[in-house]
Image: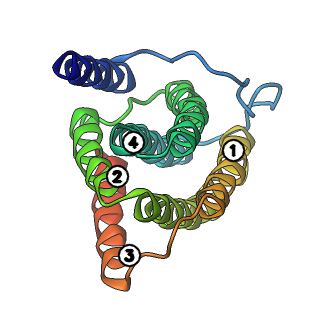
Amino acid sequence: MRELTLIDHVLDQLDRGLRAVHAGTPGTQRPSPATGVPEGRLGERERRHAAALMRVNHAGEIAAQALYNGQALAARAPEVRARLAQSAAEETDHLAWCRQRVEELGQHTSRLGPFWYWGAFAIGLGAGLAGDRWSLGFIKETEDQVVRHLEGHLQALPAADARSRAIVQQMIEDETHHGEQAMALGGVPLPAPVRGLMRLAARVMTTTAYRL
């Protein structure tokens, strides 16, 4: 019975990974924040730049799905698993919003989606195996770094691109909330060397996804 349960978990994670990476625009719990926001007048260079930034955000959301799924697989406490599942559902909204926006701008999402997913899944599983308190602290640090990254995108997006800005602003609010909830459940701050390694990994992903 235990072996069957493990197999079921593995198959579920494979299914989640395939859907996160290869599905078209996935279903959402909430409408896109860009709904009803008029399309701005963007030059070709501005359009390509905005699309590349939103491609980075989409790649980040693929990684977020993987992190939460990996952490949930190793979580001990039911309330932690439930919190991870809810956060993952909200990240699915982000995934759909970003993909839709990239396609509206006439570009493609990152071609390295499988790499972002399974690399992040391994990291998330490792964080989960370290224990719930460290796993929750990992969420907090991840979300803090994501918020800083998204705030930078608000500055970098073309002024006329109100649709992308609306999406990024809602993502900032959601990510901040995820981090706060993780600490409320008992997360502990991560050591400085771990935070530094996380920033380095994020820099590699964002730089690469901007182009690929």
Return the mark for residue 161.
1
Return the residue at label 4. Answer: 59
Residue contact at pointers 1 and 3, CB within 8 angstroms: no
Say few, some or many: other residues with alpha carbon within 10 Å of mark 2 (under 14 / 14 to 19 / 20 or more).
many
Does dot 1 land on a helix, a strand or a loop?
A: loop
- Front disc: 2 or 3: 2
Q: Between residues 135 and 39, which one lies in front from this camera angle? A: 135
Q: Which residue is mark 3?
A: 195
Residue 196 horizontal/vertical position (percent): 34, 78
Give the mark nearest the N terminus, 2 or 3.
2
Q: Nearer the viewer, residue 78 or 116?
A: 78
User: Alpha-carbon distance for marks 1 and 3?
Assistant: 32 Å
Helix, strand or loop for disc 3: helix
Q: Dot 3 surroundings within 10 Å: few (below 14), some, or many (20 or more)? A: some
Kind of residue indicated by mark 4: Ala
Q: Earlier in the sequence, mark 1 or mark 2?
A: 2
| Quadrant of the snapshot with the N terminus | top left
What residue did someone put label 2 on?
128
